[in-house]
Amino acid sequence: MLANPEFVRNVRSQLRPAKIVTAIIIAAALSLVVGFALTHITAPAAGRFGWGVGLLHMLFWVQALILAAGGGIACVNAIYKEKEQNTFDYQRLTRLSPLELTLGKLFGAPIFMYFLCACMLPLVVFAAIRGRQSIAFVLAGYVALLVGSLAFHALALLISLLIVRGAHTSAIVFVLVILALFSSIPAGISYFFQLGSLSPFYASHVVTQSSWSVAEPAADVELQMPPDLDIDVFFGRTVRHFPVMVVVDALLLAWLLLALCRNIKRDPHQYELYSPWQSLGLVLFVNLILLAFVRWGSASLLDVQAALLTVNAVVVGAIGLGQLRSRDRTRRILRVRKETGTSWIDLAWPAPFLFIAATGAGLLVAAAAMRARNPLIAWSPAFAVFRSLFFAAWLMRDLQFLQWMALRRGKRPMVMGTLYLAVSYACVGILLSSTGIFADADRVPFTAFFLPTPIYDLDHAAWMLRPAIWGAAFLAQWLMVALFIYAQRKTVLELAHPAVPGSVSPIAT
């Protein structure tokens, strides 16, 4: 890093002597005051080693706030400010490789936040000594803080690369909201998943631990509510959350670095976060994480499968949006393949990718549920596969519609397509609710023609009431997918063989 020009430039611009001296004086004054006040005012607290561990917990929480929130905002500004000042194009043209430029910004943009955390180190040592905390837990806390912050900084840097002018404030708010969600996500997902926090704030919990041992799993470990968020269940085995958090955040960091290195030196109109094969790998990675920590005993297999399919719908939908091709990008692809001819994949894109990703994820979930199920519980593999394909059909239908809209002429076609989808779902939902159709179990299957939500209530009893209607709704979604592919095919062929201006058609002659 010391030989990286981008990192050195950030260090020189942010760590100026006057700024460094000011930060050291403020940190030293606060440390002396806090240490004096705690040793002379606060009485020794009951419990393990008094107030030292409590101070250590607070210091790591403050460092996580400084490094995650402050460093995240610095990373959002890193590329966006360069674009506003028209200097980013010069950086893209330098001899720095994409990885060197990415790492220079990743470590250089928040360098002052790292320095602020280093200024708090003497007070951390003081708190660890007074709390008689092992140095191993303090070092583990810093590892969790660093790895979690780097993953969050990489996400903020990717957002800085992708945002357009006028969206700077929204991007900062979005980054802070993501940080807050990552800090509170265990409480929201603990019903179906036994996975603790992945945010840098977990470091404040690591430094308060007293043992690395893991108790033997109880017989009903998957039924405990709320679960112990410091203990994860990894494929049915209890493990400490600290190594899981470090490994998962490191893998997320690797995926974000891949997206940054692919696009940081490209022109904005050529941005593509991941290639199709890389996107399929990302879907597989997310599903392995979900299946590794899912709590199969927390609810019925149908409910757990519905939860996993919902998460997959969000993940595959977000990745599928990144695979949509604009009108200009489609022209460039067709121009490159002019000699070989337009392939059927180009005419139907992104249907092949979505089919493999959505159905593959659904079948993986169904196979895992079949392996984890209780033999005494009724479970039909064929029914689980049908449910997975139903989710895939809805996802393909909506994204194929957005792809068709993206290829049409007009201002902001993607925005208009999203608006059309939102209005359509809102109108259908209002009309069906006003007629009371959702309250009648015999008529609920008819709503599957218009909304994906009835699939959550699809079980053996519901299937036996209206098997023909459920099957017809399923086929209707695939028919809609075929219709959108056909409409898209005509548009792609028009782009591949544009009409020559001034030419006269044979019919007109």
Image (cartoon, rainbow, N blue to C red):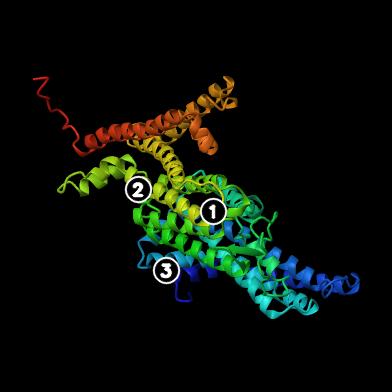
Vertical order, 99 against 189 (above or below):
below
Nearer the observer, 96 or 210: 210
- Judging from the image, what secondary structure is the residue with disc 3 in? helix
Is residue 121 at all visible to an observer of this figure? yes
Q: Quarter of the image containing the C terminus?
A: top left
Image coordinates for residue 347, horizontal then vertical, percent: 26, 40
Whether tag 1 and tag 3 are in contact, CB under 8 A, the answer is: no
Sequence order check, earlier mark of 2 and 3: 3
Return the x and y of residue 421 as percentages of the image width and height: 46, 31
Can residue 18 be seen from the camera position used here?
no
Q: Name the residue under label 3.
A: 100
Residue assigned mark 2: 353
Q: Nearer the viewer, mark 2 or mark 3?
A: 2
**Distance from the alpha carbon under mark 2 to that under mark 1:** 35 Å
Looking at this view, name the residue that lies furthest to the front: 376
According to the picture, the residue beneath numbered tag 1 turns out to be: 375
At horizontal 75% and vertical 74% (from top left) the residue drawn is 123
Disc 2 to disc 3, C-alpha distance: 31 Å
Task: Decide: few, some or many residues near mark 1? Use Cα within 10 Å; few <14, some 14-19, many ≥20.
Answer: few
| Mark 2 burial class by Cα count in 10 Å: few <14, some 14-19, many 20+ | some
- Disc 2, SS: helix
Residue at image x 53%, y 64%?
Answer: 248
Which comes sooner in the sequence, label 2 or label 1?
A: 2
Task: Please state if 381 lies on the left or on the right of 38 as rendered.
Answer: left
